[in-house]
Image (tube, rainbow, N blue to C red):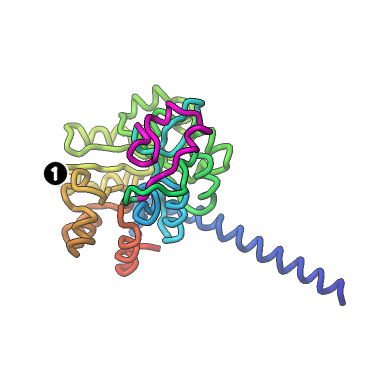
């Protein structure tokens, strides 16, 4: 009887472990599959610098909170220490977001870890500046990641993602044109998930999109615009038909001509903000209000 109970316990615990592991793998596989379906009607939500309203921006804690909310993608910013370690920091200095001064490149990782991140009120917390490796270990199997400010560090990021087994979870991005990217990163451009950033206010925006899709078919195009008069906003179905999603930021007015998060949340006017963005083709939205965005989309049946 004791032997039978022991065997039953082993089978039960093994089953629980496998189920949990499978659930995590399935979550990411499902998100990767969804990301590569440009005609999918469901909206994917990106948390800008994590849940920075409840934790320091670009912190492990902020990323944990965003994952717990159920976002599909977290956005973060890459920088580099004096000893060549890729860390997460938006600004070119640590002045605004930590209790230190100077640039990440002024310090080794060990020195940089002595500083602490500030929260949204400017108060110093116990959180430290994370490395890209730490972030990828945290989010492995859980969520996708958008690597902003990553263009100078594509090679280093690629190696970290390969080493951590998280390459399929990462979206590389840049505002550079196709020829420039191909010339600078010929050995990895065909091995990464790539998104091009396009300023619709600039002449030739459609040509930039078409040129990219002719050569590598980016998984998405991040469309930024100060005015909402671009013909591409009215006629952008060609982007989806040619294999790419449309990403629009709802962060601040300069990225979306005023169809922003504050209009939706603070003014309660989704018609001229989130509704408008979706009506103009977005199936990925980067937001500073991930909790409210998820509630809004789920109510409309637009988030899985």
Q: Provide the secondary structure element on which disc 1 rests.
A: loop
Query: Where residue 229 sits: x, y (%)?
Result: 12, 45
Q: Which of the pair 107/252 is nearer the observer?
A: 107
Query: Where residue 195 sits: x, y (%)?
Result: 36, 39
Q: Is residue 192 above or below residue 65?
A: above
Quick check: is 53 in the magenta stretch? Answer: no
Residue visible at 61% across and 58% down in the picture: 21
| Residue 4 seen in the figure | yes
Taking the image as shown, residue 286 lies to the left or right of residue 2, namely left
Query: Where residue 112 sits: x, y (%)?
Result: 47, 34
Residue visible at 36% across and 52% down in the picture: 52
Query: Where residue 211 sits: x, y (%)?
Result: 30, 32
Q: Residue furthest top?
A: 183
Picture quarter containing residue 272? bottom left
Q: Which residues are magenta?
A: 93-119
| Residue under numbered circle 1 | 227
Q: Quadrant of the N terminus?
A: bottom right
């Amino acid at each position: 009887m004791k032997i039978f109970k022991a065997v039953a316990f082993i089978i039960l615990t093994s089953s629980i472990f496998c189920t949990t592991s499978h659930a995590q793998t399935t979550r990411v596989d499902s998100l990767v599959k969804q990301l590569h379906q440009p005609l999918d009607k469901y909206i994917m939500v990106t948390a800008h610098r994590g849940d920075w309203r409840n934790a320091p921006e670009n912190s492990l804690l902020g990323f944990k909170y965003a994952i717990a909310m159920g976002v599909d993608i977290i956005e973060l910013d890459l920088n580099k220490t004096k000893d060549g370690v890729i860390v997460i920091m938006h600004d070119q200095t640590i002045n605004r977001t930590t209790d230190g001064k100077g640039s990440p490149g002024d310090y080794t990782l060990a020195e940089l870890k002595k500083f602490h991140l500030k929260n949204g009120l400017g108060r110093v917390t116990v959180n430290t500046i994370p490395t890209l490796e730490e972030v990828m270990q945290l989010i492995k199997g859980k969520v996708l990641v958008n690597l902003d400010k990553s263009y100078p560090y594509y090679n280093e990021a690629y190696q970290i993602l390969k080493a951590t087994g998280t390459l399929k979870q990462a979206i590389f991005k840049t505002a550079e044109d196709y020829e420039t990217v191909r010339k600078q990163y010929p050995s990895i451009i065909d091995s990464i998930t790539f998104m091009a950033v396009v300023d619709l206010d600039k002449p030739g925006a459609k040509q930039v999109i078409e040129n990219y899709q002719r050569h590598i078919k980016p998984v998405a195009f991040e469309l930024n615009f100060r005015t909402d008069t671009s013909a591409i906003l009215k006629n952008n179905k060609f982007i989806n038909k040619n294999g790419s999603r449309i990403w629009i930021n709802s962060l601040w007015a300069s990225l979306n001509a005023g169809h922003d998060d504050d209009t939706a949340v603070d003014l309660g006017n989704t018609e001229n903000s989130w509704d408008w963005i979706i009506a103009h083709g977005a199936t990925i939205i980067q937001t500073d209000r991930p909790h409210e965005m998820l509630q809004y989309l789920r109510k409309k049946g637009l988030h899985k």
